[in-house]
Image: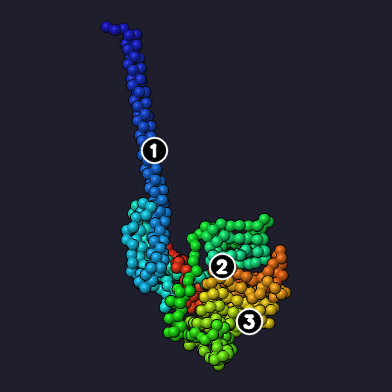
Amino acid sequence: MPSPASQNESTRVTLAAAGIGNERGATLVMVLAIITAVLLIGSALFILGTGEADVVEYGVDNTMAFTVAEGGIERARAFLEQLAETESAVDPVGVSFTNQSLGGGTYTTTILDEVSGGQWVKMYDILSTGWKDGVPRQVRVTLQEETFAQYQWFINQGGWRWFRTGEKFEGPVHTNKKLQIDGDPWFGGKVTASEGITMKQGSNPTFEAGYELYVPTVDLPTFNEITSIMLPAANDAGIYAGPLTGNDARYEVVLGQAGTGTLSYRSYEKVGPKYEYSTWIDVDIASLNGSAWFAEPVSIEGTLDGQLTIAVEGSITITNDLLYEDSSPGTGPNPGCDDMLGLIAENDIFIAETVPNMNDCEIHGVMMALWKNLEVEDYMHGPPRGRLIIYGGTMVEQVLHIGQYHQDEVVSGYYRDFRWDDRLDAFWPPFFPKTGRYFVRRWQEISPPQV
C-alpha cells in the first residue's frame, strides 16, 4: 500500500499534466482565431481590391467609350466633306455607320436630320454612341459647312505676306504658305499656316488664341466653281448684267443712290465710234435672292441696306467708302446690324486713287480676289492716304499691296486697319464660297445615353 507521501506526489504529477494540456488547448484556440482573422482580412482585402479594380476598369471603359463616340463624329464629318466634294446633290440624312470598330470599342453614328433652314450653307444633326466593354457614352452635334467668310485674312499662294508692327487681326487668319512675322503684330483669333514660320530678329508677336503650323491647305475656289453657283442664282432671282461692247467696257454700281435698300447700276460701253453711259437701272435689294452677277469689270461705292453678294467677271474697283446702312463710320456695324456684303472678283480688287479715297477708305464686307491681289492703285507713289479700314474679311490668291513702308512707317499708300466683324462667325454674305470643310456648330453629351 502506497505511503501518503507517494500519493501526494502522484496527485501533483497528474495536476501538472492537466495544466500542460490546458495551456496547449488555449494556444491552439488562439492560433485558430488568428488564422481565421487573417483569412477574413485577406478575403476583405481581396473583395476590396476586386471592387477597386472594377471601378478603375469602369472609369477607363467610360473614358474610352467617350473617345470612341467622338471618333464616330469625325467619321461623319469626313463622310460629309467627301460627299460635298464628289456628290454634293446626294442627301446624307439617314446614313448610319453601325457597330464600327475603333480603339477596342465600337460606335454607331447616324446623320439624323438637315437643320440648314433653307440656307445654302448645310447643317446636319449627328448622333454618335460609343461602347467599350458594355459601357456606353453618347454625343449629339450639329456639323456645319465652313465658308471663306469665316476668315478675316486669307492668302492662298501668296507673295508678300508679312505681318507687321501695329497690325491687329481679331479674327481667324490663314495662309497656305509660311507665316511671316516682322515686328509685333497682334492676333486675337487663331492663326494657321500650311508651312512653317519665319520671324525677323527682334519680333515679338502676340497670339491670343495660339497658332498652328503645317495644317492642311485650304484652296480658294476657282472662278468656274463660283460661276456654277452664282450665275444660276443671279439668273433666277438676282441681278444679271451681261457682256458689253469694247475693251474698256465696264459697269458702275452705287449702293443706296436711289434710296435706302437700293442698288443702282449703269453700263459704259462702245456705241458706234465712241463709248457712252447707259441710263441708271435701280433695283430693290430686298426683292432679290441675294445674288448679283456682272459680266464686265465693276466700279462700286455707297451704302448697303440688306444682304448681297456681287460676283464680277474681271476686276472690282472701289471708288469711295462702302458702308453698311446700320453702322457708325469708324466703328463698323452697329449691334443688331443685318447688312452683309460679299465681293468676288475673277481678277483683282483695287482701291482707286480718287479724291474721296485720299483720306482714309472704309469698307464693310467680305472681299475675295481670285487672280492675284487686293491692291491700292499707285500705292508706291504720293503721300500717305491715311488708313484702309476693313470691317470684315479679305481673301486673295497672292498678296495685299496696301502701302509702301520705310521701317515701320507708311511713306505712301495706306496703313492697314483691319477689324473683325464677329457676326461672320455665323452670318455670311449670300452664296459666299465654302471651304469644303465642316465644323462643330453645337455639341452636347446625352446623359444618360438613350440606347
**Quarter of the image where one finds residue 33:** top left
Dots 3, 1 in contact, CB < 8 A: no
Q: Which mark is residue 320?
A: 3
**Quarter of the image where one finds residue 380:** bottom right
Amino acid type at image mark 3: Asn
Disc 3 packing (10 Å; few <14; some 14–19; many ≥20) = many
Q: CA distance from mark 2 to mark 3?
A: 24 Å
Q: CA distance from mark 3 to mark 1?
A: 88 Å
Amino acid type at image mark 1: Ile
In this view, the residue farthest toward the left is 1
- Name the spot of residue 337 as percent of width and height, x first: 56, 80
Closer to us: 410 or 353: 353
Q: Which residue is mark 2?
A: 398
Is residue 255 something that shows in the picture? Answer: no
Using residue 329 as the reference point, say whether residue 422 is left or right of it: left
1 vs 2, front mark: 2
Counting residues from the start of the chain, the first of labels 3 and 1 encountered is: 1
Dots 1, 2 in contact, CB < 8 A: no
2 vs 3, front mark: 2
Counting residues from the start of the chain, the first of labels 1 and 2 encountered is: 1
Task: Locate the N terminus and report the quarter of the image it occupies.
Answer: top left
Using residue 81 as the reference point, say whether residue 254 is left or right of it: right
What residue do we see at 41% from left, 51% from top?
59
Q: Which mark is residue 41?
A: 1
Q: Which mark is residue 406?
A: none
- Name the spot of residue 206 as percent of width and height, x first: 63, 61
Rendered position, 123 above or below 312: above
What residue do we see at 63% from left, 60% from top?
181
3 vs 1, front mark: 3
Closer to us: 6 or 214: 214
